Image (cartoon, helix red, strand yellow):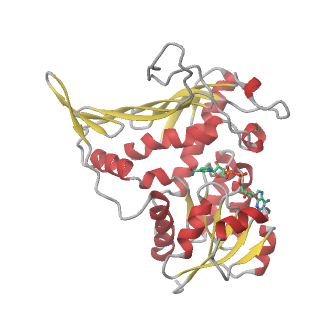
Amino acid sequence: MKDTIKVGIIGVGGTISSTTVILNGEPNVELVALADMDANRRERVLGDIKGVQVFDDYQKMFDTCELDAVCIGLPTWLHAPVSQEAVERGLHVLCEKPPSNDATELVPVTQLAKENGLIYMFVRQSRFSAQLMEGRRLVQAGELGDVYYAETRWIRTRWSSARGWRHDKEKGGGVLLDLGIHAIDNVWFMMGCPRPTEVMAGLYCTFSHLVPPDQTYTADDAACGFVRFENGCTLHFAVAFSMNTTNRQSPDKNSDLVNKEIQEFHLYGTKAGLENGKLLVGTPGGVKVKPMKPSPQDADDITLQAREFIRAIRDQDEPLNSGSQAVMLMQILDAAMKSSEINSAVTIQPVT
Ligand SMILES: NC(=O)c1ccc[n+]([C@@H]2O[C@H](COP(=O)([O-])OP(=O)(O)OC[C@H]3O[C@@H](n4cnc5c(N)ncnc54)[C@H](O)[C@@H]3O)[C@@H](O)[C@H]2O)c1
């Protein structure tokens, strides 16, 4: 491996805007180029950073610049084709979540990366948070006993955002791909990423009348379901852009308008449970509630994630957010969509 890793940015969407600035400050990393079709967003992200070639077309960047790696923060429907092209050009890839529209288009990307000794990593910055790291450590250390059930929710009471492609099912819109991947991965990561075998789910679009009149909403705005894993664990998820709920928090008065967002992720094992930062230790008479004590992190989640990408490239090692996990996550989401379509459970086959 060369001393300096030369990085290009394709699309400054999602967390890739922060990742751009972070990588610029990392030792032995050179931020060579940035491609985004929006000049204002390019300038906003680069700020005072000098010496970076800018492009409005990522193809021009590919053709012009000598790069080792790219970070991709494009609208979801472009993630897989652009990752594929980057890998074909011999580049390591860090790609925003969701890594693709479906597992079928992601498999060739991760397989080619593996065959060619390239790192493919997907963005899931929360995995680097002290809370999820500590949850995973407790599971690995056996503190929860055998984990057999997980519950995860990310519910918005009302969705007010009006960004175009998120409305469009064909372009990777909808709550399952947007929040579902985060919600499911929060618990799946702590469980140790067992292989999914079956999903039963329902997807709904019941609040499309709330989008601005000049827009059309064709995607799901709520999704709930149940995932079964090879090791016998089960996981229940519920995600929504809009739902008639108080998110289980009581409004102060009956007339209060509730418009909130809540994330809950719970794991249950034979010895103890984990509920949003609390360890629930089982005793014969009930549960003892203890605060989790995560080790302090020396940087924020997105910085740790960017460093993990660089470490994996340098050490030629599998990153924490690996390509095979990205494929399994997409298989869960694909199976949830299919299950809703056919009104039946869907079996997931391992990728060969
Ligand atoms: N990890 C997270 O917490 C997180 C948070 C927000 C968004 N995201 C993900 O990030 C991705 C982007 O989301 P967003 O809300 O920022 O979207 P967005 O549409 O606002 O931003 C996408 C960026 O890509 C650029 N772009 C679009 N087409 C392009 C092209 N052909 N060539 C070059 N540049 C192009 C746009 O100018 C824009 O800067 C989505 O997949 C989303 O799921 C992740």
- Residue 88, above or below 248: below
Residue at 36%, 37% in the rendered image: 276
Where does the image place residue 278, in percent across and percent down from the top left? 29, 37
Residue at 43%, 46% in the rendered image: 189
Q: Is residue 352 visible?
A: no
Tell whether 123 sits left or right of 58.
left
Tell whether 294 sits left or right of 53.
left
Where does the image place residue 263, in percent across and percent down from the top left? 47, 36
In the image, ligand 1 is in what quadrant?
bottom right
Q: Quadrant of residue 179?
A: top right
Tell whether 248 sits left or right of 130.
right
Residue at 38%, 42% in the rendered image: 191
In the picture as drawn, the residue positioned furthest to the top comes out as 254
Q: Is residue 143 visible?
A: yes
Where does the image place residue 289, in percent across and percent down from the top left? 22, 33
Asked whether 95 or 330 is in front, the reply is: 95
Asked whether 51 or 346 is in front, the reply is: 51
In the picture as drawn, the residue positioned furthest to the right comes out as 214
- Total of numbered circles in the picture? 0
Where does the image place residue 216, in percent across and percent down from the top left? 82, 32
In the picture as drawn, the residue positioned furthest to the left comes out as 284
- Residue 259, above or below 44: above
- Residue 83, above or below 161: below
Q: Quadrant of residue 215?
A: top right
- Residue 200, above or below 333: above
Q: Quadrant of residue 11?
A: bottom right
Residue at 58%, 57% in the rendered image: 15
